[in-house]
Amino acid sequence: MIRPVALLLDFGGVIVETTRRPSWAAELAAEVHGLLRRAGFDGLTVEEVETDIRAGARADKYWKDSTSRRFAPEEMTHREFWADYVGGDWPEQARTLVTAEATPLCRRMGELRSGRKLRPGMEELLEACWANGVTPAVVSNALCGVVHRDFMTTAGLDRQVAVQVYSDEVGVRKPNPEMIWIACRALGADPAQVWYVGDNYDRDVVCGARAGVGATVLMVSGSTDKIPYRVRQSPQATVEDPRGLLTLLEETWI
């Protein structure tokens, strides 16, 4: 494998481990219901709001699986998610309100839905990259990239990566190769001279192959085996965790 000039990392499953919070939909529904009530709308119960939030999230998952079959999928906007996937059957006032508040609501949804914990060895990996002339960056699909940016800042890693590229901010989503190409252009790097590291076959491995990166590395996570359909592309290497990735990198530094 080539010695890379840059290391592009997925966020969920690579930089962090995520755990779904069972109460997230009820908590978000209570906040949305309060938002509606403050605007003078009382046509939905909090239980109905929760039901539609859960339905919207499930429909969004199906949509994301389907977009992985497309060559260059675009990202769903925050407004589309709340107007069509959650509030599609809501009265006009309620639908208009959540559409107007779509971005902060997506941010709150991202904050509530999952707990996040830095994967062991990630800090050492980033430090070693800088010490050996490899520029690290983040390339990730995201409902709301600001949530990921907030985590990076809180963890003290925002200054340990050169650029963060999130799908909701740039308007395209993996496996669209443009996600990787955006990061490469920002770093002034040839895709053939970078590694891309992700934890999913249908989004990450396919994206790396389409973008023509020097190597695609699969890092095993809890979602790696949840493959919606088989893909023909294969990673150049598979690692268990950030420490395994560092070992792989060190072999190219000898």
Image: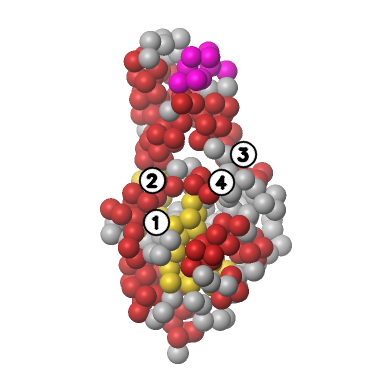
Q: Is residue 74 shown to the viewer in this render?
A: yes
Q: Which mark is residue 16?
A: 1
Q: Secondary structure at mark 1?
A: strand
Residue in the foreground of this view, choosing between 55 and 86: 86
Residue bearing mark 4: 171
Disc number lying in front (4 or 3): 4
**Residue 204 percent across, percent down from the top left:** 58, 59
Disc number lying in front (2 or 4): 4
Residue 2 on the magenta segment: no
The kind of residue tagged 2 is Val
Give, as a single range, the part of the protein colored magenta.
89-97
Q: Secondary structure at mark 3?
A: helix
Q: Which mark is residue 54?
A: none
Q: In the rendered structure, are the residues bearing label 3 and label 2 in contact, judged by CB atoms less than 8 Å apart?
A: no
Q: In the rendered structure, are the residues bearing label 1 and label 2 in contact, judged by CB atoms less than 8 Å apart?
A: no
The kind of residue tagged 3 is Tyr
Which residue is located at x 49 percent, y 84 percent?
252
Colour approach in the figure: secondary structure
Distance from label 2 to label 4 (Cα)?
Answer: 17 Å
Which residue is located at x 42 percent, y 14 percent?
45
Answer above or below: position of 3 versus 109: below
Distance from label 1 to label 2 (Cα)?
Answer: 13 Å
Disc number lying in front (1 or 2): 2
Residue bearing mark 2: 147
Q: Secondary structure at mark 2?
A: helix
For mark 2, does the 10 Å Cα neighbourhood hold few (<14), some (14 to 19), or many (20 or more) residues? some
**Residue 12 percent across, percent down from the top left:** 45, 54
Distance from label 1 to label 3 (Cα)?
Answer: 23 Å
